[in-house]
Image: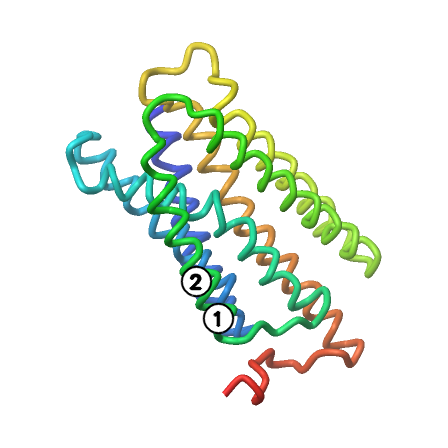
Amino acid sequence: MMELLFLIADLWMIYAGFTCGWKFIRHYGNYLLGLEWMVVGTSGTNFLLWSLLGGDEDSPLYWLAYYFDAFSRSVGVTLIVVLGLLRVTHRYHPSRTVDVGAFVLAAIAGLYLQQFHHGFHAGPATFYVVVALLTSVFVFWFANRLRQIGAHGHAIATALVTAAGLAIAITYDFFPIPGDDEYRTIFYTLALATWGTQLFVLFRAYGALHQHNVASGVESAVNRRADART
């Protein structure tokens, strides 16, 4: 039963990552969030294939699983998410240089940090928790912004998934779940379900704030990059 739940949770994250990621790009022109969502979807796909093929630690998929994990936990769902959400909170349109630079930074961070996946390493583990906490502070503020415009459902959902994501970040390295197996099936099932829900909820919340900005006349209906970026 737990293996089935793991499969469902991973498929949910894959679906949310690719579907919402594509919609971020198509409907809002937000490449930062769109591409990061797709990176998470790709990570889930790789993790699923690796698990279905036996979970061999000598497989390239094993290295990729930890690379994608480090990519997103370090910069992807932290700095990139904040930069992407700033578009609807402060009408901040980062330049292409900033877009590319953020993903290059995430790629470098992923290459460096994936080496610490064996065993417990206090430095990287603490770093992941700190950046998750700082990002959560911003997203809680984002949830409050939703509350202020009357999007109470989106605000509550955003706050709840953010709290859940922070709990996963803290549990990840510091508090193993009692009774979990050697593959941490229980933990990863909870984590994948949480991450997938975060992707979906943040996409919906972003859309709600975007529509408010359009109705208020501070944002165009089609959120395209400024001509000055060309």
Secondary structure under badge 1? helix
Snapshot quadrant of residue 137: top right
Relative side of 217 to 79, left or right: right
Give the amino acid type for the residue marked by disc 1 in the picture. Ile
Q: Which residue is rendered at x = 38% and y = 40% of the image?
A: 113
Q: What label does residue 25 carry, if any?
A: 1
Q: Which residue is rendered at x = 44% and y = 66% of the image?
A: 22
* First of labels 1, 2 by sequence position: 1
Image coordinates for residue 121, horizontal then vertical, percent = 43, 25
The answer to whether any part of residue 1 appears in the image is no
Q: From the image, tell me which residue sits under label 2.
A: 35
Snapshot quadrant of residue 218: bottom right
The answer to whether any part of residue 4 appears in the image is yes
Q: Nearer the viewer, residue 17 or 95?
A: 95
The colour scheme used to paint the residues is rainbow
Secondary structure under badge 2? helix
Q: Which residue is rendered at x = 42% and y = 44% of the image?
A: 12
Image coordinates for residue 154, horizontal then vertical, percent = 70, 52
Image coordinates for residue 187, horizontal then vertical, percent = 44, 25
Farthest top residue?
179
Crowdedness near tag 1: few (<14), some (14–19) or many (≥20) residues, C-alpha within 10 Å: some
Give the amino acid type for the residue marked by disc 2 in the picture. Leu
The correct choice, above or below, for 110 with respect to 86 in the image is above
Crowdedness near tag 2: few (<14), some (14–19) or many (≥20) residues, C-alpha within 10 Å: many
Disc 1 to disc 2: CB gap under 8 Å: yes
The correct choice, above or below, for 122 with respect to 39 in the image is above
Closer to us: mark 1 or mark 2?
2
Image coordinates for residue 150, horizontal then vertical, percent = 82, 58
